[in-house]
Image: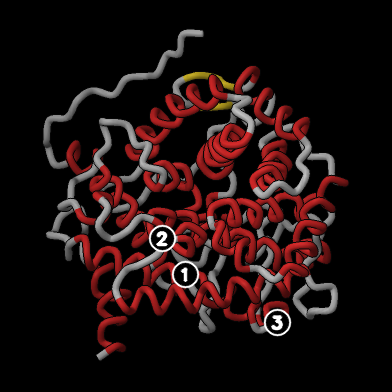
Amino acid sequence: MKKILIYFLLIVIPMLSLAQKKSAGPALTRKLWLSYMDRVARPVMSNLAADELKQKMPMMLSDRVDDKENRTKVGYLEAFGRTLSGIAPWLQLEGGDTEEIKLRDQYRGWALKAIANAVNPHAKDYMQWTGGQPLVDASFVALGLVRAPWLWEHLDEKVKVQLTEALKATRSTVPAYSNWVLFSGMIEAFLCKYDLGYDPLRVEFGIREFTQHWYVGDGMYADGMNFHLDYYNSIVIQPYLSTILDEINAKKKTYLHEQEQQLVIGERYAQILERMINADGSYPATGRSIVYRGGVFHHLASIAYKKQLPESLKPAQVRCALTAMITKTLSAPQTFTADGWLNIGLCGKQPGLADFYITTGSLYICTNAFLPLGLSATDLFWSAPDEPWTAVKVWSGQDVPADHALDIKK
């Protein structure tokens, strides 16, 4: 019976066009999300918990890779940090039906063991924590622990010390003058949250550059000195900036104005992202890192999870839009290897789409599409009746309000 249910969730439902046919309903939609999240996250978390990630995980690299040896070494931290950051809100949640509670308990156990192995110099899966790329993915580990205090509270004291030392070791890396300044800032936000001695200058630098120098208008920031037409406002910039502001203000109340302004900017960018999802769940394949799949909707998932959606976006329509996107990107043939690992691609196996820095580990940022699983099944995001999203309304001939740019008065 269980195999039949899994087949129904992973094979039958994805074949239904959510834009054209009646949905299976909110309850089954949550189960669908859980089944996809489990399928993506299980190989990473279960193997790292068993100290076998480096042994079992295939390391696919871009054909244009710049440093094969180093990219291979850091790809494991990529997979772990990105996976943890996406499943963290769900790990923090309590309750649910019996099956969900059982699954969460299993993942909580895996996560605690995975963290311990990642920071234990004597473990086979001890991660590389210094260097350029490790700064990026150490910040995703920090983000996961910010989102799931339960994990930090249940870590062994020795592991806490080792983890803190590993994260502080990233300070030896000077971030690139781009969204990378937020990677340093996120690690310091983690250290601030848990009173581990944070560096306010590393936080200040990232916040100041984005809020004072790099906002370019209509809900979007430049990625450093230049604006790029890609999804990095969603992949990193806005989820990171808002989280850093939240955590620092919770302790210090240093950036209340910047936090208020980011809420407005974040609402506008959420509107733009929701309109990007086409009626069939596809979206423009533009810009770098497009193989991140659902990771390019990190911001939309985050703002829905934090219950900060603008009035123009109903939680149910965002749920339906994200469901269509998740289904489109994870149900395509050859999305997964025979052993269950993600292949490089956006709609199946498409290695040509990989930028030079892409590894198998990079792909697991797609778990950040699942952030709303951190909301209980009774929350409106999950319990409200299905709602068509903007593309469905427009391309089925429905009348909808016109879209307008955001102008901020300073």
Task: Determine whether the residue tagged by mark 1 lies in a helix, strand or loop.
Answer: loop
Q: What residue is rendered at 17% in x and 65% in y?
A: 24
Outermost bottom residue: 1
Q: Quarter-wise, where is residue 235 in the image?
A: top right
**Along the line of sight, the residue nearer the viewer: 55 or 118:** 118
Q: Quarter-wise, where is residue 96 in the image?
A: bottom left
Report the disc number at residue 335. Answer: 1
- Tell me the kind of residue under disc 1: Thr
Whether residue 247 sits left or right of residue 17 in the image: it is right
Q: Distance between the residues labelled 1 and 2?
A: 8 Å
Q: Distance between the residues labelled 3 and 2?
A: 29 Å
Whether residue 170 sits left or right of residue 5 in the image: it is right
Mark 3: give few (<14), some (14-19) or many (20+) Cα within 10 Å. Answer: many
Between discs 3 and 2, the one toward the N terminus: 3
Between discs 1 and 2, the one toward the N terminus: 2
Mark 1: give few (<14), some (14-19) or many (20+) Cα within 10 Å. Answer: many
Outermost top residue: 410
Q: Look at discs 3 and 2 and give the one toward the viewer.
A: 3
Q: What residue is rendered at 15% in x and 55% in y?
A: 20
Residue 86, percent from left and from top? 51, 58
Q: Quarter-wise, where is residue 32 in the image?
A: bottom left
Q: Do the residues labelled 1 and 2 touch (CB within 8 Å)?
A: yes
Q: Name the residue under label 2.
A: 329
Residue 72, percent from left and from top? 76, 67
Residue 164, percent from left and from top? 77, 57
- Tell me the kind of residue under disc 3: Asp
Task: Determine whether the residue tagged by mark 2 lies in a helix, strand or loop.
Answer: helix
Q: Name the residue under label 3.
A: 51
Q: What residue is rendered at 60% in x and 24% in y?
A: 255
Q: Is residue 231 visible?
A: no
Between discs 1 and 3, the one toward the N terminus: 3
**Along the line of sight, the residue nearer the viewer: 82 or 109:** 109
